[in-house]
Each structure stands twice: as structure tokens, then as C-alpha cells.
Amino acid sequence: MKRVAFLLILALLISCTEKEQDVIVKVDGSTFTKSQFEQYIPQSEYTKLTDAQVKDFLDNWVDQEVLYLEAKKRGIEKEDSIQLVLNQYKKNLLAMELVRREFSGTTVVESEIRDYFDEHYNEFLHAVKVAQIVLSNYDLAVRTLNEIKAGADFYKLAKERSLTRFENPENPKIETEYLLRGTIADFATEEVIFAMEPGDVSKVIPYVQGTYLIVKMINKRKVKAKAEYDDYRDAINNYLLSKKYQGFLVQYVDDLKTQYKITIDLAPLKKL
């Protein structure tokens, strides 16, 4: 019995020693271990870093940890507004991880990429010159488009409302140079633009960073005799995978909704 107890104590001491040796950084009671470090940077990668680069990484961890510990000391994490954000972040993180795992086996096969390239081949031979209005929200974009349809001057509205006017008020870049397929925005936006003819005005198009785009086609001209598949393959693959993801997400959420009892009651919001 004594021998067993001795062996247990010895194993515990060895374990504690190993854990102690695994610690890279200490900030009061907080520790940062080798195994934690390797979750950020695998051993195969950090062995290529200089000591100065590793030290910079660890210094950043220390800075973050000191701020975190001070916030905890002041009880900030217990405040209702902070708890609300933390809980929402946790929900978002878990939801994203669930979707990532469910979607992770989805791929785009070569024939799908080739079919897209062949279907849109003519677009890859052309360049377009367009006028643009970039707007900050959907309601303003719809109102602007309706005014254009009613006869308002496209260029006048662009000078008054387009976000591009803030970059250079003297030259708000209403008209672009001739642009090739794959250089304007995402492929979904380009599909809309390259399907237009001179004089056409587009629908409201979701654009970058939550903005909205209205485009007027000025001219379209052929600039290539041939388009090479390999030049566009990776971009097409990424676009088609993104489309699959969007479709999957809608269907997956709809399917999950059938498994939960969902009620919406606006009455509490209307109480005085």
C-alpha cells in the first residue's frame, strides 16, 4: 500500500514538473503553455520564426492578458451590457462552427467549373465601361433607382449621392475605365453587369462592405480573341463554392426550424 501511495505521489510530482516546464509565460496566476502556443502556431511553423518574432507574439499575448485581468478585477465582465455581448458572441461562434462542420465536406467538381467557364466564355473576352452610384443603404438605393427610372439624371444623382464623391469631390469617379471580367467585384455582381447592354441601368446590386451599387452601361467591347480556362479556374471555384454555401445555409436553417417550436409575439413591444 505504501509503495502504491509513493508511486502515485511520484507520478503527480512528475506531472506537475512537466506542466511547469510547459509554461512559456506567466502573468500572476495566468499561464500560457507550449500546447496553447501551438494552437496558434504549429511547431512546423514556429520553428521557422526568429526568437524576436516569437517574443513579439508573446509580448502581444502578455499585453492582452494584462488588460483582460485588469478588466476582470474591475468587474467589467459582470456588467449586463458586457454579458449581453459575450453571450451573443458565444452564440455566433457556436452557430458558425456548426455550419462549418456541416458544410465542410462540400466541394466544387471540375466539371462544374468548366461548365461555368463555357457558359460565360463570351464575357471573359469583353471589357465594360460603366457609370456607377455607390450608396450607403438599401432604402436610399431603391429610391435613387426609382428616380432614375422616372427620368432623373444619372450623373447628377451620382455627384450628389455616390460614396465615391468623398474620395475626390473634384473627380468622384462616376465613370470607370474599361474593366475586364474578374476585376470589378465578386462574380455575382459581374454577371449582372456583363449581361447589360449600352444604355441599360442595373437593378440595385449588393456591393462591398454593406453598400449598394447602381450601374449604367456606357459601352462594352471585345478586347480578347481567346480566354484561358486556367486564368479563371480558381476564382470560379471560389465563387461556385460560395454560392453552394449560401444555398446550403438557407436550406439547413429552414430544415432545423422544423425541429423547434418557434413563436413570435410583437405585443410586448407595443406595451406603453
Image (spheres, rainbow, N blue to C red):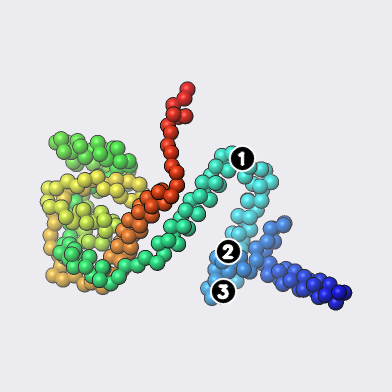
In terms of depth relative to the viewer, which is nearer, 32 or 113? Answer: 113
N-terminal label among 3 and 1:
3
Q: Is residue 236 left or right of residue 122?
A: right
Q: Position of residue 262 (x, y in %)?
A: 43, 42
Q: Which residue is mark 1?
A: 79
Q: Residues within 10 Å of mark 1 (few under 14, many from 20)?
A: few
Say which residue appears at 16% left-offset and 50% top-offset. 217
Q: Position of residue 257 (x, y in %)?
A: 41, 48
Q: Which residue is mark 2?
A: 57
Q: Is residue 105 above or below residue 168?
A: below
N-terminal label among 2 and 3:
3
Say which residue appears at 71% left-offset and 69% top-offset. 19
Asked if marks 2 and 3 touch (Cβ < 8 Å), the reply is no
Camera-nearest label, 3 or 1: 1
Q: Position of residue 103 (x, y in %)?
A: 40, 62
The type of residue carrying mark 2 is Phe
Residue 146 seen: yes
Q: Which mark is residue 43?
A: 3
**Where, quadrant-wise, is the N terminus in this rendering?**
bottom right
The type of residue carrying mark 1 is Glu
Element carrying mark 2: helix
The type of residue carrying mark 3 is Gln
Element carrying mark 1: loop
Q: CA distance from mark 2 to mark 1?
A: 30 Å
In terms of depth relative to the viewer, which is nearer, 116 or 149? Answer: 116
Q: Residues within 10 Å of mark 2 (few under 14, many from 20)?
A: few
Q: Is residue 237 left or right of residue 100?
A: left
Asked if marks 2 and 1 touch (Cβ < 8 Å), the reply is no
